[in-house]
Image: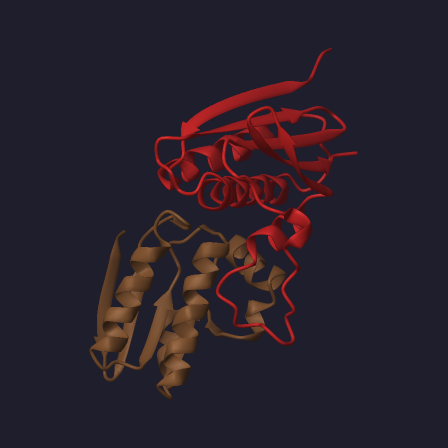
Chain colours: A red, B brown
Amino acid sequence: MKNAIDIEIVVPNQTRYLSMIGKIGENLVRELDRFKGDREALAHHLNVVLTEGVVNAIKHANEADPNKDIQIRISASDQEICIKVYDSGQGFDLTGVPDPNFETDRLGEKGRGIFIIRSLMDSVEYKKTNGGNVLEMKKKLS
Amino acid sequence: MQLKIEENGAVRVIYVKEERLDAHNSDELKAELNRLFDSGMKDLLVDLKEVRFIDSSGLGVLVSGFKNASSRQGSFKLSGLQSQVKSMFELTRLHRVFDIFQTVDDALESY
């Protein structure tokens, strides 16, 4: 039986939609009948990476312009969850974002978002696409 | 953002009455913390019992409060962390930075 899910969301470039987007990620995990791992943890992690990924697009890529859109695509199969967050802005250099050094800079107020995404997902890429950029985050499920 | 502030001697207890502390509302908590510091308070306790979800922006605001209190020789403590919130402190090693208590009463006894 076919078991793949593909969700596409388009919202204005505003933080008020974070909660809704995070909940869509959490609800998706409930439908992954064949996932054998910790469902509650996976649901939380998807909520976190969706929140961090969308905030990143709103603030750093779309320059906080409330009239732009954010497009999010979530694809789930038995093997993998792939989340893509598209922005239409200038973008940023993902490889130029270092992981925070917890010994020398444990009290930094910024810079944890990308670290959190990298920690919770198996792969993270940021690429140019038609008219913008995409942050692609993948998690293996089996 | 729904916040409740209680006086307990020199300590101000800030109850965050939201399910999420994230990039959408954390600036409002930061503004309230700054208002309390500016009015001369230096010992703050933030209760997160009702918060089910925190992101890097929420964590950043708490770090900002901690630094602000430290610079005034004050204290900045936390209580009531739910398991998912606690996991974010552990992931970012911030559980080593803050004094974290189970309940507001536990935290108040520590002063």
Image-based side of B96 in relation to B38, left or right: right
Image-based side of B39 in relation to B53, left or right: left
- Does residue B80 appear anywhere in the picture? no
* Residue A15 placement (x, y as % from top left): 39, 41
Q: What is the residue that sits farthest to the right in this orientation?
A: A142
Q: Nearer the viewer, residue A59 or A142?
A: A59
Quarter assignment of residue B37: bottom left
Question: Is B84 above or below relative to A103?
Answer: above
Image-based side of A26 in relation to B30, left or right: right
Residue at (52% x, 68% y) in the render: A108
Quadrant of the rendering where the C terminus of chain A is positioned: top right
Quarter assignment of residue A136: top right
Question: Is A38 above or below relative to A111?
Answer: above
* Residue A113 placement (x, y as % from top left): 56, 52
Residue at (71% x, 37% y) in the render: A139
Residue at (42% x, 66% y) in the render: B62
* Residue B9 placement (x, y as % from top left): 23, 84
Q: Nearer the viewer, residue B57 or A126?
A: A126
* Residue B110 placement (x, y as % from top left): 41, 84
Quadrant of the rendering where the N terminus of chain A is positioned: top right
Question: Is A65 above or below relative to A74?
Answer: below
Residue at (64% x, 32% y) in the render: A128
Q: What is the residue that sits farthest to the bottom in this orientation?
A: B73
Q: What is the residue that sits farthest to the top in this orientation?
A: A1
Q: Nearer the viewer, residue A83 or B93?
A: A83
Quarter assignment of residue B74: bottom left
